Amino acid sequence: MRVLIALLLSLAATWALGKVVIPWLHALKAGQTIKEIGPKWHMNKQGTPTMGGIMFILGTLIAVAVLGWHDFTRGDFGALIVFGFALVFGVIGFIDDYVKVRYHKNEGLTASQKFLLQLAVSVLCTVLLRNFGYLQSHLYVPFVNVTIPVPWGLYMAFAAFVMVGTDNAVNLTDGVDGLATGVTMPVMAFYTAVALLWGKADLAVLSAALLGGLGGFLIYNFHPAKVFMGDTGSLFLGGMVCGLAFALDLPVVLILVGIIYIAETLSVILQVGYFKLTHGKRFTIFTLVTALMCLLSWLGIQAR
């Protein structure tokens, strides 16, 4: 019941926040700047407010603070660690967005600045998850239900690489109205189901809260979008996607549930081309592919 309430509370809070945040972003003149080298059909997005990820970040925070307090008092801090990890990524994105808005440039932080900040927070998150008992230095392999031991030093390097890679992959997916939102919603639904199956209530509340927050955001982000999440939102989502995977001790499953993020990373050209070929139907197809991969992953997960 707590999980369902967290979902609904976050959805309602995010929807309500949109009534305030979107006008504020308009007043701030936080309009999206489109690269001149991009497709011409992207130019109609010029001026649409960005940094809208603030809405579902706050919506998720409200739900977790209200519904997750019981878990915190019992010493279950997994949700707090993952949210804090994702929030730092979101702050990195906010800085990037602010530079773009303030100086009217499409490039904010440099690639090296982002990488170093993401790397540092990824290592910290890995250490905290291990110290609080959420993470073991092994890889759980779905379908065969086996674990492969990995030396801790090697595991930390692997985790940092996957976290930074996933975060930037999700960031690339945020290119078309509702795409990153629609792709991430089935992933959060999958994490919620796994967390409930494995008795990790705090993580179930967190993933369900973000699922609801994305639903509330989608109301404003569906084509034609009234607001974009910006790097603020997409980097936060990336942190949540990989943070929850590691907190649930399921990093290998990112290959399946994150198939669209991987595809986006391999080819942004594929993303744009497919959208044009299907005349705007790509959102539905990509969401369906992600949902099917999440279902396949669920079939490979064993109760532990």
Image: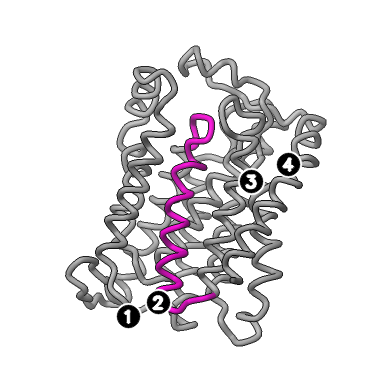
Q: Residue furthest front?
A: 1
- Circles 4 and 3 in contact, beta carbons < 8 Å: yes
Q: Is residue 291 left or right of residue 222?
A: left
For image coordinates 40% across by 29% down, the residue present is 282
SS assignment at label 3: helix
| Mark 4 to mark 1 CA distance (whole Å) | 40 Å
Q: Mostly what secondary structure, the magenta segment?
A: helix
Q: Which residue is mark 1?
A: 304
What number is the disc on residue 216?
3
Name which residue type carries label 1.
Answer: Arg
88 in relation to 67, above or below: above
Quarter-wise, where is residue 212 in the image?
bottom right
Residue 183 covered by magenta stretch: yes
- Residue 263 locus on image (x, y percent): 31, 39
For image coordinates 36% across by 37% down, the residue present is 264
**Mark nearer the N terminus (3 vs 1):** 3
Q: Residue furthest top?
A: 40
Q: Which residues are magenta?
A: 174-201
- Circles 3 and 2 in contact, beta carbons < 8 Å: no
Q: Which residue is mark 2?
A: 198
**Front residue (pair 117, 287):** 287
| Mark 4 to mark 3 CA distance (whole Å) | 8 Å
Location of the N terminus by quadrant is bottom right
138 in relation to 269, above or below: below
